[in-house]
Each structure stands twice: as C-alpha cells, then as structure tokens.
Image (tube, helix red, strand yellow):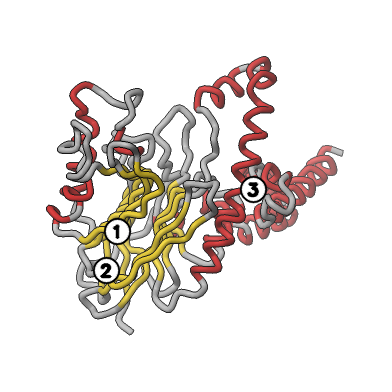
Amino acid sequence: MRRSFAFTCTLLIIGWLLVAIACVQVPAYTFWPATFGALTLPVALVLNLLAVGYWLLRNWRVATLPLLVAILTWPHFQRGLALHPLRVAPASTAPGQRVRVLSANVRIFNVYPQLRDAELNSSRQMIQWLADNPADILCLQEFYNEPRTSTSKEKNIFNSVERIGEQAGRQSFVSRTLTNRVGAEFGIAIFSRYPILRRGTVSFGKLSQNHAMWVDLRLPSADTIRVFNFHLQSMSLDERDIVDSYSSKAGFKRKGLGLMRRFKRGAVARSWQVDTLVRRFERSPYPLLLCADLNDLPYSYSYDQLADRFQNAWASVGNGFGHTYHGQVPLLRIDNQFAGPEWLVDDIWVHYEIPYSDHFPSTVTYRLPPK
C-alpha cells in the first residue's frame, strides 16, 4: 500500500514536471497563467530527484523511471543550479581568438538622492572600476552620463562616457532613452577595445524605455562579430513588498495579489520583447554575443527562448546559482550572457566583490576557434 502511494506520487511529480516545462515554452502574451506554472519548475525538478533517491533505496527497477526523467530534464536543472565541479578552464595557449565581455546593470551610477552615499563614493568607485577593467567589451544597462555640455555641477564625476570610453582606450556607443533638463543622458551603452564597424538599436515601442542595441566589431583575428546589449521590461516589484508577502499570511493577503498582477504585466511585455529580439538575432550574419538584464528567472519564457538557441555562459561553465541580484531576495540570476554556437565559453566570474549597484557584474571569457 505504501509503495503504491509512493509510486502514484512519483507519477504525479513527473506529470507536474512535464507540465511546468511546457509552461516555460508558452509566451505570456498568449496565455499568461503559464508564467506562474513555469515558476514551479525548480520545485518539480528537486522533487523528481528526491523520488530517484527514494526508489533507489526501495526498488531500483522503479527508480529507472524518475532517473530517466532526471537525465532528460537535466539541462533545465542546470539553468538554475549549474554543476561543473570537475571542469578545468582551457589553457591560455588553446587556439582561437579570446574575447572578454563584462555585463553590468550600473543603476545609473547611484545618481538619484536616495541611492547616493557620502561624497558620492560609490558612484566614483563604480565608474573607476569600469574604466580600469581589463575586459575587451563592456555592456552596461541603466547607464548614465553627464557630458561636458551638461549644466550639472557634478559632471566631472558622472562624465562616464569619457572616462570609461576615450580615456580607457575604448570606442563607445550610447543608446539614449532620455536626456534631462541639464543635459544628462540615460540609456544603455557598449564600450569596445575593438573597432566598431556598424551599430543600431531595437525599439520595444514608444511606451517603453526598455530596448536593445547592437554593434558589429572587428576582432584582431579579422573576424567580425555582433554584440547585443538589452534590458527587458522590469518586474516592477518592490523588494520590501516581496519580503512582506512571504513573511506572513497577512502579508501575502495584503501584498501578494498586487505583486502577482505586476509580475503578470511584466511577463507579458518581456515575452513579446524577447520574440522581437529573437527575430533580429536570426538575421545576424556574424557570430553573436548577448548581454542582458532579462529581469526574468532561468525558468521563464524569455530565458527559454534564448537558452534554446544560444549557450548560457553560467549554465555552460559555472558552479552554483550564479545569482546576480544584490538585494534581500536571495539567489536570483536575472542578468545573463549568451553566446552563439560558434563560440566556446572558457570561464565566467560574477563580481560579488563589487557591491555598488543592486546587480553584480559578470565577466565571461569566450573563444572563437579558427575557421
């Protein structure tokens, strides 16, 4: 009787797991409830692994069923918790052109009063760290710049294009979404030590400041590559509300429904935004590298559309959760880098030692093998 109940539970877990995987592949703009079904995928994956352990102790023949499911769904497990304990980084003499790419949401360099600290130290240090960084390509979201023509009194601190770009030996491309009354610029940016041959932007509509940008770069190997930098629709969720919602039953009643409505609206926007980008990616004549603040989890339609077509850097070579969100909600990886099939991912590093923004930067070393 106990084994019959356990077997029924195992079948239910497998069914749940398959439905959750199906939900990941449904865009929220066609059926938004699938978004919340997809969020249960990590729970179903863990329960299936527990079922494997249970049946290995009880009946190894029955264990083959959840074990087979675990093997087939392992790439989905790796999306959230990457495990490569025995992996050794390739030698520096391995053939191919190496390219180091840093991606970071810099939170407008903490220019707003509620983000500032004494003497603007975090702003100075963040800009200086980026200027000194050895990466070949920098992709920055929530970028902020005060050019020399700005009337701001602090333009010598926030002249970020000049300091990260020209003074550091990099070419720059800033895609502006807003210029305020003192001439300061908001948007996203790409900085490159390689020559920028062409550039462009991808709009998500007049009602959204979120958008994408791209550049074509000429490498020393004479190869041309295309780099995309994009920032998808925000979750629009207040961190304090999230903590309150799961801290108590009353907190969930007070905050939970509002959070779910806002998450739904964001998921709908992100799903059609990523579909817009995928169509652009498919037209690229060059090897692709993608840097993004997805504002979405590895168990989402947005991530799935990219992971089905490209290598996720963390899932390929990382170890652990690789969380990039610097806040009270733990273990969230909402910032990602992806690479086309032509690339090899040699190494990835999330910079937990850089605490200036609410996102941790990440650096990935890619290698483009000789043709």
Residue 173 tag number: 1
**Marks 2,3: beta carbons within 8 A:** no
Three-letter amino acid code of the residue under disc 3:
Val
Mark found first going from the N terminus, 1 or 2: 1
Give the secondary structure at mark 3. Answer: helix
Residue 34 horizontal/vertical position (percent): 71, 48
The quarter of the image holding the N terminus is top right
Give the secondary structure at mark 1. Answer: strand
In front: mark 3 or mark 1? 1
- The CA distance from mark 2 to mark 3 is 34 Å
The quarter of the image holding the C terminus is bottom left
- The CA distance from mark 1 to mark 2 is 9 Å
Residue 196 tag number: 2
Task: Name the residue at the top extreme.
Answer: 250
Q: Nearer the viewer, residue 345 or 220?
A: 220
Three-letter amino acid code of the residue under disc 1:
Phe
Three-letter amino acid code of the residue under disc 2:
Ile
Q: Nearer the viewer, residue 222 or 15?
A: 222
Bin the neighbour count of mark 1 within 10 Å (Cα to Cα): few under 14, some 14-19, many 20 and up: many
Instruction: Say which residue appears at 47% left-offset and 46% top-offset.
Output: 209
Task: Name the residue at the bottom extreme.
Answer: 371
Instruction: Say which residue appears at 28% left-offset and 37% top-offset.
Output: 182
Q: Nearer the viewer, residue 30 or 211?
A: 211
Provide the residue designation for mark 3: 268
